[in-house]
Image (cartoon, grey):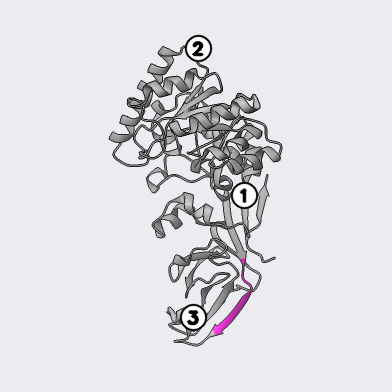
Amino acid sequence: MGPTRAYIDHRNLIHNLTLIQKAVAPATVMGVVKAEAYGHGSIEAARTLLANGVNYLGVAFPEEGIKLRKAGIDVPILVFGAHLPHFFPQFLDYKLDITLTDVEQLEPLRALCRKYGLRPRVQIKIDTGMGRVGFLFDRQQDLIFKIIEEPAWQVVGVYSHLSSADEEDTTFTLQQIKEFSRIKSVIQQKYPELNALFHLANSAAIMRFKESYFDMVRPGVMLYGNPPSPAFNLQWPLKEVMAFKSKLTLIKKLDAHQPVSYNRRYYTPRPTYIGLVPAGYADGYNRKFTNRGQVLIRGKRYPVVGTVCMDQFLVDLGPRLNGVKVGDEVVLFGKQENAHIKIIEISEKLETIPYEVTCWVSGRVPRIHLK
């Protein structure tokens, strides 16, 4: 096993969760742990969230929920998105909340309920402008009412998703919030006894739109210490939960004008020392860092040079080592001494979003959980 590790600081996860809980009260918090909790480890993250006041979890696929159930987690788990009816037995077996998004799901689910004598929990997804998953309320209102009235299942939630809450222009987001609020009023007026949670807010909405909180909020990226985009950096004192680190395993001296790594994309401009870091794009250190990335060694930034390989990359340590030696810690992102390479910085450099940066860190990188 190589020296590359992802360090998951659960103290920072608790810090971020506490900020959210205080801001959104009395609304409750759903802990979104899909995609292995954005790369942090779903079971471990879920346990920390549940120990600190979270009583609902969200995942993207039934197998993610099943994994949590097998780990002994018994709180309600909502599976987002649209799923084919042949997966419904899994939802029933493991008591996962089913998202209803389309009329084609209804009869197969109804038949399963009759066959097994079960009454599953379902949530109705409404499309308020995302254009992706969900019923169109005004066009399908009668169908939605029939779903609510159906005795074969129990409707425990109604939700929608915001498409643009991180944009500077708030017009469309406010329109979506207003529409969801209207839908909530219509449903509650018609079914005053309906005991269902209405929820809409994602991380960006939690940070910007108090009117989006409703009964429950769904933080994802901000739980793990990252803003949805650079514009949010200073608004909330979030703490990054993941740090990505390795160690120098080789140092060699090259003459001036020597090629480095695949396809000779870098030539040494002077005699210099090159350091080898045993992490590559198979570990989640993106190939786009070729001649663009930086790492921390002994609290100082060093440039990534040459093509990032599958399992390793190279850094230019300069003409003098200044104490740098094999075995030194290399920080790919995170803190070292007084220096910090932030995840948001990496996402800007690679023209992506912070979500993707932590999800890149692959399964072969061990997670070290700090509690």
- On the image, numbered disc 3 is attached to which residue? 260
Tell me which label, 2 or 1, sits earlier in the chain: 1
- Mark 2 residue type: Glu
Q: Magenta residues?
A: 247-253
User: How far apart are the alpha carbons under marks 2 and 1?
Assistant: 43 Å
Image quadrant holding the C terminus, namely top right
Q: Which mark is residue 193?
A: 2
Do residues under tags 1 and 3 come within 8 Å of each other at their CB atoms?
no
Residue nearest the viewer, comparing 19 with 125? 125
Binning the other alpha carbons within 10 Å of mark 1 as few (below 14), some (14 to 19) or many (20 upward) gives many
Q: Is disc 2 placed on a helix, strand or loop?
A: loop
Q: Main secondary structure of the magenta part?
A: strand
Q: Nearer the viewer, mark 2 or mark 3?
A: 2
Query: Eyeballing the image, is 101 above or below 283?
Result: above
The image quarter in which residue 110 lies: top right
Q: Which residue is at a point 62% across and 32% down the rendered structure image?
A: 92
Image quarter hosting the N terminus: bottom right
**What amino acid is labelled 3 in the image?**
Val
Which comes sooner in the sequence, label 2 or label 3?
A: 2
Q: Which residue position holds label 1?
A: 8
